[in-house]
Image: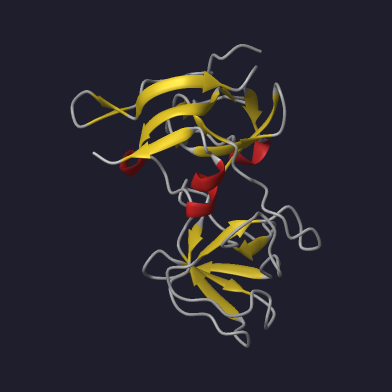
């Protein structure tokens, strides 16, 4: 596998301002986007935080689902926005509160039902104390399983180029930058902890 990206486009903003100010290092071989993120019409922009599990391995985007209200341990419904990369919550997805540090949480669970409301947010039906207490503006993330309680994307780099899933596509590959300078305000959400472990990437403001 090369560093090429299937159906890639150059990501630019504000005329000719690139996301990347400098790329100094790329992980060998790149990786293949996991099946859950192969959906026609979706675009994963340059600078998206990702986890690559090995040379030519699985490429998993880092995605967050913002809570639309405070959550108490006794609640059985939690309201969230769609994922930051466009994923719609469903009952097959295991969620956990995003840890402040590390990649492992105390609790994780899949909702038993998901219903969209009039504002376009999603009500997740859960069992009391599935997530504990949380505040509006906190994030849920996708976990590997309810027993593992580990985020599926641990973040070890950022996408070099856009990945666009075209009609009929069944696979997509991407290159992962682990050393460089990026415009922080022009990339998808990345947690402070994820930034801290990408010690060779400088997140610069305009």
Q: Is residue 181 left or right of residue 171?
A: left
Q: Residue 75's x, y, as percent?
A: 59, 85
Q: Is residue 204 left or right of residue 127?
A: left
For the point 62% across and 84% down, the residue is: 73
Q: Is residue 87 left or right of residue 93?
A: left
For the point 74% across and 60% down, the residue is: 149
Q: Is residue 175 left or right of residue 118?
A: right
Task: Choose between 135 and 102: the one closer to the eye.
Answer: 102
Q: Residue 16's x, y, as percent?
A: 22, 23
Q: Residue furthest top?
A: 2
Q: Exactly how many numbered labels are in the figure?
A: 0
Q: Is residue 196 visible?
A: yes
Q: Would you identify the image quadrant in which residue 17 lies?
A: top left
Q: Is residue 41 visible?
A: no
The N terminus is located in which quarter? top right
Q: Residue furthest front?
A: 199
Asked if 177 appears above or below 99 in the picture, the reply is above
Q: Residue furthest bottom?
A: 74
Q: Residue 27's x, y, as percent?
A: 60, 22
Snapshot colouring? secondary structure
The C terminus is located in which quarter? top left
Q: Residue furthest left?
A: 15
For the point 44% across and 74% down, the residue is: 136
Asked if 22 appears above or below 194 in the picture, the reply is above
Asked if 96 appears above or below 46 in the picture, the reply is below
For the point 55% across and 22% down, the residue is: 175
Q: Residue 58's x, y, as percent?
A: 69, 31
Task: Choose between 193 and 109: the one closer to the eye.
Answer: 193
């Amino acid at each position: 596998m090369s560093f090429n990206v299937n159906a890639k486009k150059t990501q630019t903003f504000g005329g000719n301002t690139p996301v990347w100010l400098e790329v100094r290092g790329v992980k060998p071989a790149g990786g293949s986007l996991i099946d859950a993120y192969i959906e026609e019409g979706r675009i994963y922009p340059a600078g998206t935080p990702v986890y690559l599990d090995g040379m030519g391995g699985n490429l998993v985007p880092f995605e967050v689902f913002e809570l639309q209200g405070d959550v108490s341990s006794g609640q059985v419904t939690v309201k969230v926005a769609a994922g930051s990369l466009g994923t719609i919550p469903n009952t097959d997805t295991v969620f956990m509160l995003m840890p402040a540090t590390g990649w492992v949480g105390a609790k994780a669970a899949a909702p038993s039902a998901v219903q969209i409301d009039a504002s376009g947010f999603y009500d997740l039906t859960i069992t009391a104390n599935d997530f504990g207490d949380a505040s509006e503006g906190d994030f849920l993330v996708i976990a590997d399983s309810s027993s593992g309680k580990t985020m599926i994307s641990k973040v070890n780099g950022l996408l070099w180029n856009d990945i666009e899933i075209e009609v009929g596509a069944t696979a997509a590959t991407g290159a992962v930058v682990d050393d460089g300078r990026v415009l922080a305000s022009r990339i998808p959400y990345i947690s402070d902890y994820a930034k801290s472990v990408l010690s060779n990437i400088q997140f610069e403001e305009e």
